[in-house]
Amino acid sequence: MIKHFQKNIANLNYFCKRQIFTATLQIPSFANEVAIITGGSAGIGASTCNLLSQAGARVYSLDISPPL
């Protein structure tokens, strides 16, 4: 019984190890494109605005809150 328990713990440790992934994000060109982002003053909306503007899009952001 103890050997079976130790084997299960070893399997659990194997599957619970954190793996670190590195990925490069390849963004297509958005030159001559227009993006309208709602909720673009903070959080995901602000990040989307930054990402699309870096990709060459003309970005318009609308939000009820002022930018942070």
Image (tube, rainbow, N blue to C red):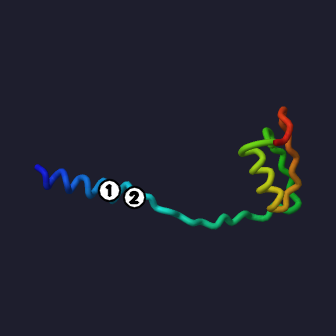
Along the horizontal axis of the image, is 23 left or right of 56? left
For image coordinates 66% across by 64% down, the residue present is 25
Q: Label 2 is placed on what type of residue?
A: Lys
What number of labels is visible?
Answer: 2
At label 2, counting other C-alpha atoms closer than 10 Å, the crowd grade (few under 14, some 14-19, many 20 or more) is few
Q: Is residue 45 above or below residue 65?
A: below
Q: Position of residue 4 (x, y in %)?
A: 15, 53
User: Considering only vertical position in the picture, is 48 above or below 23?
Assistant: above
The residue under label 2 is: 17
Instruction: Determine whether, in the image, residue 19 is placed left or right of residue 44.
Output: left
> Could you tell me which secondary element the residue under label 2 belongs to?
loop
Q: Would you identify the image quadrant in which residue 67 lies?
A: top right
Q: State the image coordinates of residue 27 (x, y, percent, origin top left).
A: 72, 63
Q: Check the image and name the residue furthest to the left.
A: 1
Q: Where residue 54 sits: x, y (%)? A: 81, 61
- 46, 38: nearer the viewer: 46
Residue most extreme to the top: 64
The residue labelled by disc 1 is 13
Whether tag 1 and tag 2 are in contact, CB under 8 A, the answer is yes
Residue 13, placed above or below residue 40 = below
* Residue 42: quarter of image: top right
- Residue drawn at (53%, 64%), measured in percent from left and top? 21
Q: Residue at x 18, y 51 (%)?
A: 5
Label 1 – label 2 distance at C-alpha: 6 Å
Amino acid type, residue under disc 1 in the picture: Asn
Q: Is residue 11 above or below residue 36?
A: below
Q: Residue at x 84, y 32 (%)?
A: 64
Q: Residue 60 appears at what percent x and percent y?
A: 88, 46
Q: Which mark is residue 34?
A: none
Q: Quadrant of the C terminus?
A: top right
Q: Secondary structure at mark 1?
A: helix
Label 1 crowd bin: few (<14), some (14–19), many (20+), radius 10 Å: few
